Image (cartoon, rainbow, N blue to C red):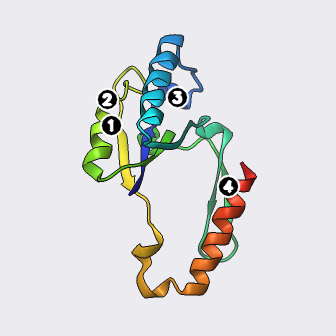
Amino acid sequence: MRVMAIVKASTDSEAGAMPKEEMLAAMGQFNEELAKAGVMVGGEGLHPSSKGARVSFGDGEPRVTDGPFAETKELIAGFWILQVDSLEDAVEWMKKCPDPHDEGGEIEIRQIFEAEDFGEEFTPELREQEDRIRAQSEQNL
């Protein structure tokens, strides 16, 4: 199963403070351990919400709101995509992670939907389309 481990933002990450060398080294070592174990599919840190935008839907035309956004604790500062056997495995991996903000923080883990999760609604034609999109996406890297 694939999961996304979501690093919640902090006041410092939203202020654009870059991690210190020690944190970069610790995260690099952790990421290397994930990669060597064949668990890490991808992962990145994100710029603060002040450099982002939101597109909201409903009531007609989409609305665009430029960052920054309130409620830092609800924002994302980074993520990993992991291939694991279970949610418990993902939890065990994330317990080994260095504190992402070196000040206390939170990592949320969520399972990613797979094609079989959608049942009969995901027709053979939609599956073929999904396969084409995935193949194209891999070429875009």
Q: Is residue 52 left or right of residue 75?
A: right
Q: Residues at badges 2 and 4 in contact (C-beta under 8 Å)?
A: no
Say few, some or many: other residues with alpha carbon within 10 Å of mark 1 (under 14 / 14 to 19 / 20 or more): some
**Disc 1 to disc 2: CB gap under 8 Å:** yes
Label drawn at residue 67:
none
Q: Which mark is residue 138?
A: 4
Q: Going from the N terminus, do you reach mark 4 or mark 3 first?
A: 3
For numbered disc 3, what is the local secondary structure? helix
Spatial CA span between label 4 and label 1: 26 Å
Left or right: 98 as drawn, with respect to 129: left
The tag earlier along the polypeptide, 1 or 3, is 3
Residue under label 2? 96
The residue positioned 49% from the left and 41% from the top of the image is: 79
Q: Residue at x 66, y 77 (%)?
A: 60
CA separation, marks 3 and 2?
21 Å
Disc 1 designates what residue? 93
Could you tell me which secondary element the residue under label 1 belongs to?
helix
**Residue 129 lies in what quarter of the image?**
bottom right
Position in image of residue 48 (x %, y %)? 59, 35
Q: Amino acid at mark 1?
A: Trp
In depth, the one of 94 and 140 nearer the eye is 140
Label 3 belongs to which residue? 13
Identify residue type, mark 3.
Ser
Residue that appears at 67% across and 67% down: 133
Of the residues shown, which amino acid type is indicated by label 2?
Lys
